[in-house]
Amino acid sequence: MDWRWDFTFDVVLPKMWEAAGVTVWATVASFVLALIGGLILMLLKTHRSPWISRPATEFIEFIRATPLLVQIFFLFFLLPDFGITLPPLTTGILAIGIYNSALCAEVYRAGFQAVPKGQWEACIALNLSTYRTFRDVIIPQSLPPIVPALGNYLVAIFKETPLLSFVAVAEIMQISKLIGAEYYRFTEAVTIAGIFFLVMSLIAAFLIRLVENYVKRSILH
Amino acid sequence: MVPRIAIVIGLAAFLAGLSVATFAELKMFLPAILKGAVVTVQISVLSWLVFMAMSLIAGVARARSTGPVLWLAVGYIEIFRGTSLLVILFWLFFVMPEFGLTMSPVLAGVLGIGLNFGAYGAEIARGAIGAVPRGQTEATIALNISPWNRMTRIVLPQAIAIMIPGMVNLTIELIKATALVSAVTLVDITYASVQQNQLHFRTVEIFAITLMLYYCFAQFVRFGGDALEERFSRHLSKRV
């Protein structure tokens, strides 16, 4: 094995540092998209009319049953056919966001279903407005199970961003591939990419546990 | 479940109809995609075996062992859950030769996917083993049953019934993850369809077929999983 530290510090790390920004941005943007999209999908799925809820259910099932990579390729090649030309990064964020909103919809649904029915009935009995029902009664009770699950999806999204290297987004994995192709040395770049993901995932898991504890403490007491 | 099977049959009929309607064009790219489907199925089956073995071994070690074995299991689980699958695949295929271990693309793909999902499966196995009532273990100790028999004859059969739903979900995730093996130069469905798309520019048809193939795989696994769950839990008392 031959690991060159000078190559690591002079070539790999500076390029990786820039690419890390792209990875983090893609993660955050996709996560926000997934949070909003998941809420919309959940509302559609739990809609009263079966004409709305059935298609939403099947859409979620379809998204969950097909690989994200194929969805990324599909959007990447399909959107230009409709005259929409987006940068690869935006297309990738869109694909990851849609994929994860289908997963988040299930999380939201489980959270809201965990609130006992009597709570809704009590709100009606007390003549609370819809806004106050949600703000003071339903959401505080449904958050504790939702937050850790959403945190898991944040880490999952983070680990899905290397897929964007398939459509040439300059994130960490793509940069390490490029370094490998340019200098024909894969060892340093790919290893550092792996360590980066491991360290960031562990840090994120730790932060999520903090947020989880904070939510539990501040809402339930 | 029944409507899903209906959808699968409907999709198959749609594919058949499509092949009749645009036969000339389909004849060009369908064989390549189906050849990719064979690779996908091969990789899925092989890496499923690695995944199951690793999740049971690491799950039991995580739940029941102490000392170095436990640390080994925790280290394995944390490392493979914490890194991205694509990075692992790249690492196995491009970096391992530096350490004197050259792998064939199939071996790298199967090992990478199997080990990565084994780490997730180990957590499910651990949860399931923990969910087997404690009295069962205590009874085997009271009856002086050896630790090996305690695990294989008493605890695991009950734990497997509990872990099946989680494992079925992970199996579907695993099939979806095989889409990444093109990173180690294998031509699976995904890569075949990208290649065919670059040749023929029939994005909608090619990717619709690809997505449907994956959807059908997933539904068949889900169907099989339901049957398996039924079989494994029929001798157990109904949990509420």
Image: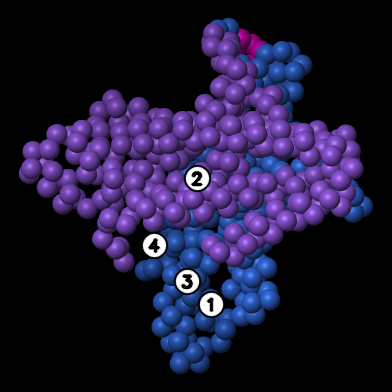
Chain colours: A blue, B purple
Q: Quadrant of the C terminus of chain B?
A: bottom left
- Principal secondary structure, stretch drawn in magenta: helix
Tell me whether circle 2 and circle 4 mark residues in contact (CB < 8 Å): no
- The location of residue A133, given as percent across then percent down, is 52, 81
Q: Label 2: few (<14), some or many (≥20) within 10 Å?
A: some
Q: Which residue is at a point 68% across and 76% down the rendered structure image?
A: A51
Do pointers 2 and 3 mark residues of a single chain? Answer: no
Q: Nearer the viewer, mark 3 or mark 1?
A: 3
> Which residue is identified by label 4?
A217
How far is the residue under mark 3 from the one under mark 4?
21 Å
Q: Which residue is at a point 43% across and 67% down the rendered structure image?
A: A219
Label 3: chain? A
Describe the element under mark 2 as helix, strand or loop: helix
Magenta-colored stretch includes residue A129: no
Do pointers 3 and 1 mark residues of a single chain? Answer: yes
> Which residue is identified by label 1?
A134
Label 4: chain? A
How far is the residue under mark 3 from the one under mark 1?
13 Å
> Which residue is identified by label 3?
A113
